Amino acid sequence: MKELDVFENWPFKVPNIEKVKTKIIEFTNNLKNAKTEEEALKVVKHYFKEFQKVDNEITHISVLYSIDTRVKKYEKAMGVLDEGIPTLQAADLEFKKAFLNSKFRPYLEKKLGSFIFTMYDYSLRAFDEKIVEEAVEENKLVTEYNKTIASAKIEFRGETYNLTQIGKFMQDLDRQTRKEASEAYYNYLETIKDKLEDIYDKLVKVRDKMAKKLGYKNYVELGYIRMNRFDYNKEDVACYRNQIKEVVTPLVEKFIKEKFKRTKISKPTYYDLSLTFADGNPTPLGTTKDKINNAQKMYDQMSKETSEFFKFLDEHHLLQLEAKEGKQSGGYMTYFPVYKTPIIFSNFNGTAGDVDVLTHEFGHAFQGHLSSNIKVPDYHMPTMESCEIHSMSMEFFAHPYMNLFFDNPEKYKYMHLEDAISFLPYGVTVDHFQEWVYENPNATKEERNAKWHELETMYAPYKEKYFKDCKFLYEGGRWLRQNHIFASPFYYIDYTLAQVVAFQFFNLDRKNHELAWKKYIALCKMGGKYPFRELIKKSHLKDPFVDGTIKSTIKPLIKELKSYKID
Ligand SMILES: [Zn+2]
């Protein structure tokens, strides 16, 4: 294979949906008509390869679009995908059906493993030609949401910012700056609230319709299948959320009290919650380039593999980190199967969050890289909750190198760990909310916001008090800014499950670094060959769903927090 070119030189190609569809049908027929087991396997392998090409093109388009939503060429290509992908999904499903029903199944199972059959069975249960129209509608609505968020223009002290860029001022040391920036941010959200609520209402209804057309009671059932939750269910999740409420909620209440004691704010309100220390939150040193250089130094020291791989990403311009006008919000890593490389996308805003990107998204990318030799594309990456273990654990493996990024690394480590623990109640709130939403698809917008407020207060009672000064937050509007709720329903509890597992890696790393790192690499290399709970079991870690895991995982972290010199 010839040397990979830098990202901006990659050829841009929009797949011809009709042609791809015809090809898929051909493969399906070839698989059905295969005379021998070897022939069947050959068709399947060839199909994997062809589909990776299309996957590569689709990924390329969506990445380019997310980097600049203003470019008409990309917007047009996204339109083709929004329209076309459901058609391809339907065709792909026919192939999967033929695969599942192949008379050579025992041989295919022997060669490809049996888990792929479980996966395909889920795909079949999640989709059918009869919901193509709804799926197209769903994609369009998600694109509309992303565009609305990305095109936000917030005026603040004579300058214009997007929703991410203003975040820096919302945690500024100067209280007046925090106040004005937060007001500008929430006042802006107030102006698009109606529009966002409308989009969501349509999304809920179209998803509910899909679920019912497929024969499910409601979208909760379909959502779990679409998220490929192979080895846990709604009841497991409910029990898990309860553990968080019992163990973590009171702890976070304590954090907040201590925080306000530390920051010496006498009458704290919502915009003071973001300030961790009296002299300001630790912010990383230098420009984006400096941060990349420091990250390179960190990965050089961490291991040979991390060193080489980070260098590769930088040299191929696969670190798209700067916040720019027209760029979609958030951060992600995605993988190009043909080029066998990931890309990291983010919106740096000068906060400690920038460093989290360099560790978190890099963790994802590193796993993609470590399992790039896995031949079956479906096994390359595990399901979402498992993927986040790779990234969140990397954030903690990076702790010993934080002196490269911060004047006061202890303060960063404290803030990072405290935030990670405090995230758990929020994460389960998002999950609980969605469960309620899809169980009550005809609820009004007001009822939805009220439910959010109720759940938010249940998992984080302190918010009730501090949110009183902000209409948008107090009326339960926070969820409108949570992309996942719109774009990937039920994709959220995943972060919290992974966080609990990452905490275990952290605890082990403090005791025995070599063992922790070895286990981590092994987990990354397993890719998606197993479902979540099995990956945990194979790594000899504790299962978050099992009662008691949260308590025993959190306990050493409290001690760890106390050990940091933050005064
Ligand atoms: Zn992630």
Image: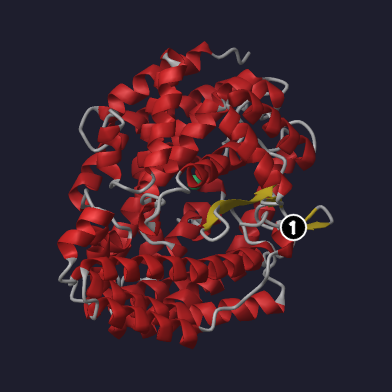
Quadrant in the picture for the N terminus: bottom right
Cβ of mark 1 under 8 Å from ligand 1: the answer is no
Q: Position of residue 32 (x, y in %)?
A: 23, 79
The residue sitting at 73% across, 62% down in the picture is 8
Name the side, left or right, on which 293 lies relative to 263: right
Nearer to us in this view, 45 or 566: 45
Please, is residue 68 above or below residue 230 in the view?
below
The residue sitting at 27% across, 60% down in the picture is 119
Is disc 1 surrounded by few (<14), some (14 to 19) or many (20+) residues within 10 Å? some
Quadrant in the picture for the C terminus: top right
The residue sitting at 36% across, 58% down in the picture is 378
Colouring method of the image: secondary structure
Q: Amino acid at mark 1?
A: Lys
Name the side, left or right, on which 327 lies relative to 376: right
Nearer to us in this view, 221 or 56: 56
Please, is residue 30 above or below residue 248 in the view?
below
Does any portion of residue 26 appear in the rendered image? yes
Residue identifier under label 1: 324
> Which type of secondary structure does the marked residue at label 1 adopt?
loop
Q: Position of residue 331 (x, y in %)?
A: 58, 51
Where on the picture, by quarter, is residue 147?
A: bottom right
Does any portion of residue 411 appear in the rendered image? no
Nearer to us in this view, 532 or 223: 532
The residue sitting at 43% across, 43% down in the picture is 388
Q: Position of residue 452 (x, y in %)?
A: 39, 55
Please, is residue 41 above or below residue 167 in the view?
below
